[in-house]
């Protein structure tokens, strides 16, 4: 099955290598510059069109589905905020639900409540998404409502002040969670002054001081047709989705110029950083120490991301993983322990987490490090590899039973990787991972400068640095 590149502008139609679907059976949307059609064995069909204004629309029709999930994506996140605008991306996530020139906040909420739908938004470091899940018959309403929010938010000053308090409470809630504090402190330690090191929601100081003008500047700078990606999955028709999107955007007053190209994707050139081996301690009077040990790692487009997925499954991906078995089951030192990796366009990190009694923190840190070193020193057995591949493959297939997961997959393909990899090819790439590749990547991680973050009742880092 195909791996299909998603060019930002081209003429005519393209069929994927291998001829999965004949594009001639699905004519381009009127006014579009590019139409890509991808078929799959389960009868689902992925289509992509670049519309006037540079708006990109990707859909996946799922035969037999009576629901659909729609997402309006902007390739802007907290890393893109200018000085004086820190926290504005997340602020907008809140404010876009507070009313437009034609809808009140109650109108927006009622539109989804009246049909039993769900709506929400998510802000990340490199993108923002406003999404909804509704019955297939209510998809036009969801498109109209979210398009209105994205294009015509009023950012009412009174609503902004009220929401400032809500966000400050959200930040305070996160600061009361020692696990959240550990994760934020770890990311800050790994990335330092790089924009990726900033918290997505902003700091208390940034939110207290940010002005409506600053939020509005950020909104106007990025909420534009050439930045917009619309993805949808479920019971839907691609042509109808495109027509509804175009109608809603034109009604908003957005200028949709013929021939306009989407903005370029982020550069995949790895950010210049000089990571250091560090130990960060955040003193908190808590009953459990929260520990994260990790290092810089793969960017989002690295071909070894499938190797990383298998490595994670083996090291800390479930109850049979090495970390869980060694730290929890064998020694009873922690309730929760796992590993994870995060990749961005030009940077990434890998880490291991555990929560334990403060008196056992040093022992747990040593065990986290030891398990990574073991993975780097000796190849995994065929049995362990087969188990990890099965775990990942099953999880991927089960997740894609949900239209929301498929909608998100389309958004990531368009904004992050620039290619659509269908499920069969994804499973094949996971199955192709070898013990030697896992060991090689583990050795690279083990050799990298390591950051240790501990949140707990410790006055300083002394007991973890010797």
Image (spheres, rainbow, N blue to C red):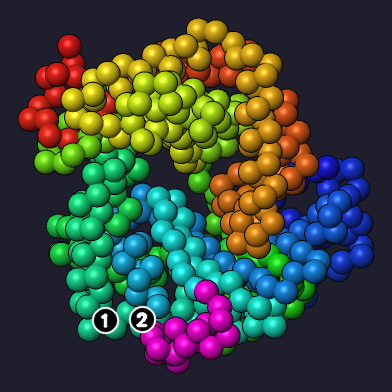
Looking at the image, residue 313 lies above or below residue 38: above
Q: Secondary structure at mark 1?
A: helix
Assign the C terminus to one quadrant of the image. top left
Mark 2: give few (<14), some (14-19) or many (20+) Cα within 10 Å: many
Quadrant (top left, top right, bottom left, bottom right) of the N terminus: top right
Q: Which residue is mark 2?
A: 98
Q: Quadrant of residue 320?
A: top right
Instruction: Report the number of numbered marks.
Output: 2
The answer to whether the residues at label 1 and label 2 have Cβ atoms under 8 Å apart is yes
Q: Nearer the viewer, residue 142 or 464?
A: 464
Q: Nearer the viewer, residue 179 or 70?
A: 179
**Residue 229 forms part of the magenta stretch:** no
Disc with the residue nearer the chain's start (1 vs 2): 2
Q: Which labelled disc corresponds to residue 271?
A: none
Q: Is residue 292 visible?
A: no
Q: Position of residue 242 (x, y in %)?
A: 70, 74
Q: Secondary structure at mark 2?
A: loop
Q: Position of residue 157 (x, y in %)?
A: 24, 82
Q: Residue furthest top?
A: 377
Q: Name the residue that disc number 1 marks.
A: 159
Q: CA distance from mark 1 to mark 2?
A: 7 Å
**Residue 60 screen position, x and y as percent:** 73, 62
Give the answer, above or below, for where 452 lies relative to 34.
above
Q: Which residues are magenta?
A: 99-118
């Amino acid at each position: 099955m195909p791996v299909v590149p998603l060019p930002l502008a081209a003429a005519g139609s393209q069929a994927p290598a291998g001829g999965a679907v004949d594009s001639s059976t699905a004519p381009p949307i009127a006014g579009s510059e590019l139409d890509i059609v991808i078929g799959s064995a389960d009868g689902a069909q992925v289509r992509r069109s670049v519309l006037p204004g540079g708006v990109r629309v990707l859909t996946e029709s799922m035969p037999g589905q009576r629901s659909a999930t729609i997402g309006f994506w902007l390739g802007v996140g907290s890393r893109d905020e200018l000085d004086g605008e820190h926290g504005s991306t997340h602020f907008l996530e809140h404010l876009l639900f507070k009313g437009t020139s034609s809808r009140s906040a109650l109108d927006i909420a009622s539109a989804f409540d009246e049909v039993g739908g769900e709506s929400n938004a998510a802000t990340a470091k490199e993108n923002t998404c406003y999404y909804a899940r509704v019955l297939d018959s209510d998809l036009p309403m969801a498109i109209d409502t979210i398009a209105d929010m994205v294009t015509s938010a009023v950012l009412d000053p009174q609503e902004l002040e009220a929401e400032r308090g809500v966000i400050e409470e959200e930040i305070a809630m996160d600061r009361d969670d020692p696990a959240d504090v550990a994760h934020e402190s770890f990311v800050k330690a790994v990335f330092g002054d790089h924009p990726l090191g900033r918290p997505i929601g902003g700091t208390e100081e940034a939110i207290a001081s940010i002005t409506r003008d600053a939020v509005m500047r950020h909104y106007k700078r990025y909420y534009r047709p050439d930045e917009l990606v619309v993805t949808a999955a479920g019971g839907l028709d691609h042509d109808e989705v495109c027509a509804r999107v175009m109608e809603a955007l034109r009604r908003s007053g957005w200028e949709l110029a013929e021939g306009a190209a989407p903005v370029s994707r982020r550069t995949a050139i790895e950010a210049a950083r000089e990571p250091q081996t560090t130990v960060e301690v955040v003193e908190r009077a808590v009953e459990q120490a929260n520990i994260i040990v990790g290092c810089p790692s793969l960017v989002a487009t690295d071909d070894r991301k499938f190797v990383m997925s298998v490595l994670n499954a083996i090291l800390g991906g479930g109850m049979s993983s090495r970390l869980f078995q060694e730290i929890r089951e064998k020694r009873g030192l922690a309730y929760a322990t796992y590993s994870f990796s995060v990749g961005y366009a030009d940077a990434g990190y890998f880490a291991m987490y555990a929560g334990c009694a403060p008196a056992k923190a040093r022992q747990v840190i040593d065990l986290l490090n030891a398990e990574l070193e073991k993975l780097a020193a000796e190849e995994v057995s065929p049995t362990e590899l087969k188990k990890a591949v099965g775990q990942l493959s099953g999880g991927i297939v089960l997740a894609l039973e949900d239209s929301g997961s498929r909608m998100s997959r389309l958004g990531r393909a368009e904004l992050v990787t620039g290619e659509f990899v269908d499920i069969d090819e994804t499973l094949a790439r996971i199955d192709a991972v070898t013990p030697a590749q896992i060991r090689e990547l583990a050795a690279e991680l083990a050799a990298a400068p390591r950051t240790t973050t501990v949140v707990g009742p410790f006055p300083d880092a002394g007991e973890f640095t010797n």
